[in-house]
Image (tube, grey):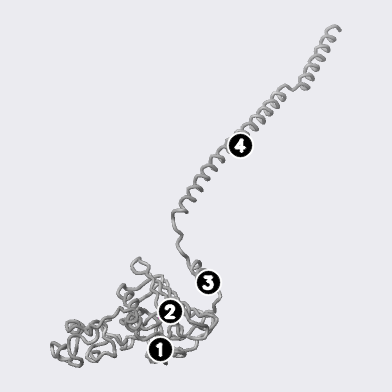
Amino acid sequence: MKKEINYLTLLLMIFFMIGCTNAEDPATSEGEVEIETQEVTTDDATKDNESDGETDIQEGNSSADTTTSGEKEESTVVEKEPTEEDSTETQDDLFSGYERLEVDGGDLSGDRASNVVVDIGYGDREYWAFTNEYGQLVKVVADEIILQDDSAEPVLSSGRYFSDEAKVPGVESDKLDEGHIIADSLGGVSNAYNITPQESTLNRHGDQAYLEDAIRKAGGATNFEAIITYPDTKTHIPSDYQYTYTLHGNEIIDTFDNVNPDEVNESLGLTNDDSSNSTGSTEEGDVSSVDTNGNGQVTIQEAKDAGFSMPITSDHWLYQYMRDNDGDGMVGE
């Protein structure tokens, strides 16, 4: 009996011990502690990583700032290439306040519309002519003057694109020419937006002729601008001209009145009585003494050797014996 009680007591003690063990579950508690420790460790690592990431980002931003700064410095040095959009905007600014009008280059009408801009360049050239509210031609501009190319363009034997020029009011005077603002030889057309009544001597061998010759000899010009001024708002005969253009990098400004330069020079006492300027050293009409080879044709050199100064114009007796290749009424200009 006593042994049975001892066995029962032992069993109860074993059950009690097992129950306590399940209640405490130390293995589980240790696992939870490990998990919590890992969570804390993970959070710390995340924070550390985030902190390191922020540092990297900050360093990256510093690098980006440096790159941006470099780009800004580079943009101040490297010039922006003009685009077609930029060109259009510039042209829109140029044409602001004017209606763009297309006029045939050989239109002989002397009428002009008011406040318009017209392309007076032959072919693909862009020479822009502007009128004011009175229909007067007041300005002509061109980025580049491109010389006439008679080997590739349909140029007449006279050296012109068209057989005649526009009949602008005033050109009917025998003292005024149908003067081009931009000559045929420089790629200009012959309509009223490129023609003004210009004093004949000035046009043929005065300042107008000199500037055209200078541009031809230079092979063209850039930044061309002509400003035409009138004495009142009714006439189409200019009072003076101002030309600005660039040759070989040098800006040139030519300003002159629409008058006979010979008369002005005479009134200023700048002429002399040396008749060799007009007749040379030979008797007028005696071509045999100028035509040294006797072929009936006088060359520029022969004329110079005989004492004649250039150019020889169409009203000179020697002109008929010389060859005027461009048909402009002058030889040796």
- Is 232 magenta? The answer is no
Q: Is residue 131 above or below residue 317?
A: above
Query: Label 4, on which residue?
Result: 50
Q: Can you say which quadrant of the picture contains the C terminus? A: bottom left
Disc 1 residue crowd, few under 14, some 14–19, many 20+, Cα 10 Å: many
**Nearest to viewer (mark 4 / mark 1):** 1
Numbered mark located on residue 240 in the image: 2
Q: Quadrant of residue 325?
A: bottom left
| Residue segment shown in magenta | 120-124
Query: Label 1, on which residue?
Result: 165
For the residue pair 139 and 318, the one nearer the viewer reads as 318
Dot 1: element: loop
Of the two numbered discs 4 and 2 on the same chain, state the one appearing first in sequence: 4
Query: Label 3, on which residue?
Result: 92
Q: Is residue 241 above or below residue 13?
A: below
Dot 4: element: helix
